[in-house]
């Protein structure tokens, strides 16, 4: 059985796009140097802002308390599976 590779694309305020691989298990996105994916320059980003746990069918997304994450229709995203290809914003 082959292992599936999962990744996310992050677009910053300047429109620049970066692609990051997600680890098997859990990946932390934040501005802290201990985060697996470090994003700097966004004042809305907390040190350990988002936890992502990829699965074949979707990705589990959970945020730090008080750290909003929004879906495409403006709904809050917190502690739920998000389908691959969905767009989220801080």
Image: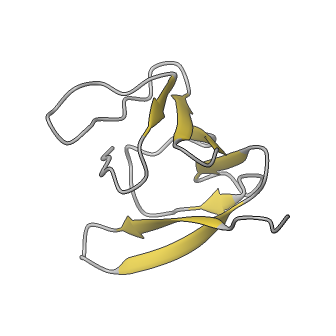
Relative to 14, say whether 38 is above or below: above
Say which of 74 and 30 sits in front: 74
Q: Residue at 53% x, 62% y: name it.
A: 39
Looking at the image, the residue that sits furthest to the front is: 1
Looking at the image, the residue that sits furthest to the right is: 1
Image location (x, y in percent) of residue 66:
45, 20
Image location (x, y in percent) of residue 76:
29, 24
Q: Quadrant of the C terminus?
A: top left
Q: Is residue 77 left or right of residue 54?
A: left
How are the residues colored? secondary structure
Relative to 63, say whether 20 is above or below: below
Image location (x, y in percent) of residue 36:
72, 57
Q: Residue at 67% x, 51% y: name it.
A: 32
Q: Is residue 88 left or right of residue 21?
A: left
In this view of the protein, can residue 49 be seen by the observer? no
Say which of 10 and 33 sits in front: 10
Q: Is residue 68 left or right of residue 8?
A: left
Count all numbered tags in the image, as a single digit: 0
Q: Quadrant of the N terminus?
A: bottom right
In this view of the protein, can residue 58 be seen by the observer? yes
Q: Residue at 24% x, 76% y: name it.
A: 15
Say which of 71 and 89 sits in front: 71
Relative to 60, say whether 12 is above or below: below
Image location (x, y in percent) of residue 3:
79, 65
Residue 10 picture quarter: bottom left
């Amino acid at each position: 059985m082959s292992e599936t590779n999962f990744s996310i694309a992050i677009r910053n305020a300047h429109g620049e796009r970066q692609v990051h691989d997600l680890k098997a298990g859990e990946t932390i996105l934040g501005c802290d140097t201990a985060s697996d994916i470090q994003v700097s320059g966004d004042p809305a980003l907390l040190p350990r802002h988002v936890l992502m746990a990829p699965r074949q069918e979707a990705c589990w997304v959970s945020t730090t308390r008080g750290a909003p994450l929004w879906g495409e229709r403006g709904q809050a995203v917190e502690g739920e599976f998000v389908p691959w290809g969905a767009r989220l914003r801080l």
